[in-house]
Amino acid sequence: MTTASIRPRAWPALSGALASTIGFWLLAALAGAAVLAAFLLVSNEYFFFAGYVVLQYVVLATAWNILGGYTGYVNFGVGAFFASGAYSTVVLSKLSQLPLPVMILCAGVVSGVIGLGMGYLTLRLRGVFFAIATLALAIVLQTLIVNWDYVGGSRGVYVIRPEQAPLLGSYVQYLFLLMLILAVAAVAIARTIERSRLGLGFAAIRDDEPAAEAGGVPTLRLKLIATVLSGALMGMAGAPLPYYVTYLDPDSSFSLAYAVNSVAMPLIGGTTSWAGPIIGAVLLGTVQQLATVTISSALNLMIVGLLLIAFVIIAPNGIVGLVTAWRRRRSG
């Protein structure tokens, strides 16, 4: 049997997978448009302010899950990538008058390069040793920012928002729109990876890396790809932060809360599916915003910790895993 006779048989499966991917991207775009329309119907500006934070966590949780969930490498250096994106915007705002979407793309490139460097240096480590190395990266970058006077150093820096937003009404609504686009893109990328050969390679590394390497899987290359994608998305999530808070300092941008939430949200939602980080981010993000308004933001990390302990006991595989197991029991 020749190669030419084999190829036509693979075309229907290939075209079906491509159609499924394109269909999901379109559905994700429609879902994002529906969310935007729903928020525009609300006259209270605070909903956009709080919704931005929830969408930011959707991007961070999805980005973390590409490396931590799909590949099995736990990353505690979320603050490093997030802050590198934020400070990339600060530097670009001082050097030029680039539009914010361009700054977001530049921040993604910077954070992706940092992810490549971090991955090349640390991905030969495994387990707790890799996690400690990523945490050390965040500490090193924070020390560099604290001693870099051009971006404000330890004093921080003020960033003035433009008087008019290019789209929608206020600038907060514009930031909400940009973060919504980022969230839709991040989720679509994660789902595309999950259904691709790249996702199969990630799963092989997560399940048994020595066996995958012995079977010919290019483990180091795949781990570097995962680190670059994860870091780039985290940096893009942090890029609009200076215009959102208007004052940026190392303590807030490198906050441990970003790392804790980015790890807890996929674990609560489920790490083996693209839907898990969304569920965890919307659930935890909404609860934290409600606690901030009604009680105090000081309780946010305590709430995350309590929910994480509860789900580790009740649903070790997250909400998605709990629903999947329930469906199997019902069908069986």
Image (cartoon, rainbow, N blue to C red):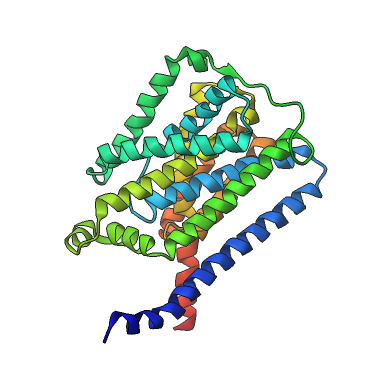
Looking at the picture, how far across and down is residue 154, in whole percent? Answer: 48, 15
Looking at the picture, how far across and down is residue 140, in whole percent? Answer: 35, 25
Q: Which of the pair 7/58 is nearer the observer?
A: 7
Residue under the point 43% across and 51% down: 65
Classify 289 as above or below 71: above
Looking at the picture, how far across and down is residue 115, in whole percent? Answer: 37, 39
Which image quadrant: the N terminus? bottom left
Which image quadrant for residue 27?
A: bottom right
Residue under the point 42% across and 47% down: 229
Q: Is residue 24 left or right of residue 258?
A: right
Classify 250 as above or below 331: above
Q: Residue furthest left?
A: 214
Classify 242 as above or below 222: above
Question: Is residue 203 visible to us here?
Answer: yes
Q: Is residue 203 left or right of residue 285?
A: left
Question: Is residue 290 visible to us here?
Answer: no
Q: Residue furthest bottom?
A: 1
Which image quadrant for residue 129?
A: top left
Looking at the picture, how far across and down is residue 199, in whole percent? Answer: 38, 61
Residue under the point 56% across and 37% down: 104
Classify 136 as above or below 230: above
Residue under the point 71% across and 35% down: 172
Q: Which of the pair 152/163 is nearer the observer?
A: 163
Which image quadrant: the C terminus? bottom left
Number of labels in the image equals 0
